[in-house]
Amino acid sequence: MSKKKFSKQHEWASVEGDVATIGITKHAAEMLGDVVFVELPEKGKNVKKEGQAGVVESTKAASDIYTPITGEITETNQSIIDDPGAVNKDPEGNAWFFKIKIKNKSELDELMSKDDYDKFAKENPN
Amino acid sequence: METQKTALYEYHKSLGAKFAPFAGYQMPIQYTSGIVEEHKFTRSEAGLFDVSHMGQLSIEGNTGLISALEKIIPIDLRNIKHNQLKYTFLTNENGGIYDDLIVTKVEKGFNIILNAACKDNDYKIIKKALGEKFKLTLHKDLSLVALQGPKASKILENIISGTSSLKFMNGKNFSYNGTEIYITRSGYTGEDGFEISILNNMVEEFAKILIVKGAKPIGLGARDTLRLEAGLCLYGHDINESTTPIEANLKWTISKRRREEGGFSGYNKIKSDMNGELSRLRIGIKPSGKIIAREGTKIFSVDGQEIGSITSGTYGPSVNGPIAMGYVKYNFSKSKTNILLEVRGKKYNAQVYELPFYKKSYVR
């Protein structure tokens, strides 16, 4: 997989060709606490950058998931619906959320590098 | 108002607690292992909870005190036994609930446990009702910890002998390091357990010993999932100034004599509620799928009519699924009634569920 890019809404995107895999960051998973429910967008749905594209529920609260990139949902990760706890265990690996067919590659340039994101997360813990 | 801290604040910090403000206090919401693990540990071993934010009120007095207190509290204080605990309320003129309480009969009068967010208002209400004749003390020098779970009794007996023979909803003075501490067999988790009232300057050392003996610290996050599985109400959510004890399905707390004689705030409304004019009832709710319906979720009948709303909703780790409580129109309150919950604009199937979601036998 390619290098990950990060958004201010604490999502990551990993790009291969014209498809991006999206998930939430380790930092976000830690902030959420135990994830107990995940709702993902439907396959084929068109989503817009920074638009809502799913929900995660922890024991504490529900949080919206946003897509960092505009495009069409091509695949969703059924395994995190079956086992939401996986989001806490491996948020930046196996517990990805969905894949998107990228509409506009220039949007990727607006995302942060790992170092920039780590700094951002430190300054904006929530 | 400045956020307050309990005497265990530094200790929680040293244990890696995540804090959040709760009722004016910085309270530990969870520790490093997280809410689900803490919840399960309490159900299988023993959890230690700091609940020192709650008010510990003592009222000194005798016969005159009983009749004065009965005007604001709907239980039979004449027949409460020495060292016995009762769950009850401070009711308002309309039969609503100012606060839910645990009242214990002690030698000098009564001890009352108050909710943190309500304690100052409760004090005013009680002071006003009792006048100057009785001595009221809201103890700032005392901490309150709860030890809950199947191993609680063994752990505590090991430290303070005699505690394991306490019966559920009974308390007693025990001697600990030469100081008197009051221990009750009670709790808010659906597990066997104890609540220990102890001086602020002794509580940290005491907590450390409990942990050495096998208890683990548990935050308010798991306290909430535990109590909801046990079907217990959280004040300000499941009960408040506009819900009556009858609507809250807590009629059992009002003793027979008080139901018949009344003589307490809000009796007229409570009486009419009991006489079949009940418009809504608190129920347990089990969503059919995995969707979690939180507080405020609207409840519909299967034919689409709005019939109520959810007052507490979360994921129950021991149930391994979503659970909730709420109020529905009385006609829909029967167990197993099919209902719909509206979450994020979509309606999901659910059923009225007979509380509790999780059952455990108490030591009686």
Image: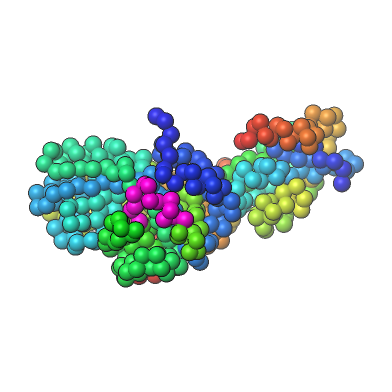
Q: Please determine whether, in this image, residue B363 is positioned above or below residue A33.
A: below
In this rendering, the count of numbered labels is: 0
Q: Position of residue B327 (x, y in %)?
A: 39, 49
Q: Quadrant of the C terminus of chain B?
A: bottom left
Q: Residue at image x 66%, y 42%?
A: A28
Residue beneath the point at 50% across and 47% down: B12
Of residues A116 and B14, the one drawn nearer to the viewer in this rendering: B14
Image quadrant holding the N terminus of chain B, namely top left
Instruction: Give left or right: position of B263 versus A113.
Output: left
Is residue B351 part of the magenta span, yes or no? no
Q: Residue furthest front?
A: B178
Above or below: residue A62 compared with residue B38: above
What scheme was used to colour the molecule?
A: rainbow
- In the current view of this chain or complex, which residue is farthest to the left? B64
Q: Which residues are magenta?
A: B196-208
* Residue A54, image x, y percentages: 67, 43
The answer to whether residue B328 is left or right of residue B95 is: right
Residue at 30% across / 49% down in the picture?
B113
Q: Residue at x 63, y 35 (%)?
A: A125
Residue A63 image-quadrant placement: top right
Image x and y of residue B151, in percent: 45, 68
Can residue B111 be seen?
yes
Q: Position of residue A91 (x, y in %)?
A: 72, 49
Q: Main secondary structure of the magenta part?
A: helix
Asked whether B14 or B248 is in front, the reply is B14
Report the side of A21 relative to B315 (left or right).
Answer: right
Q: Is residue B353 visible?
A: no
In this view, the residue in front, B157 or B116, is: B157
Q: Determine which quarter of the picture holds residue B99.
A: top left
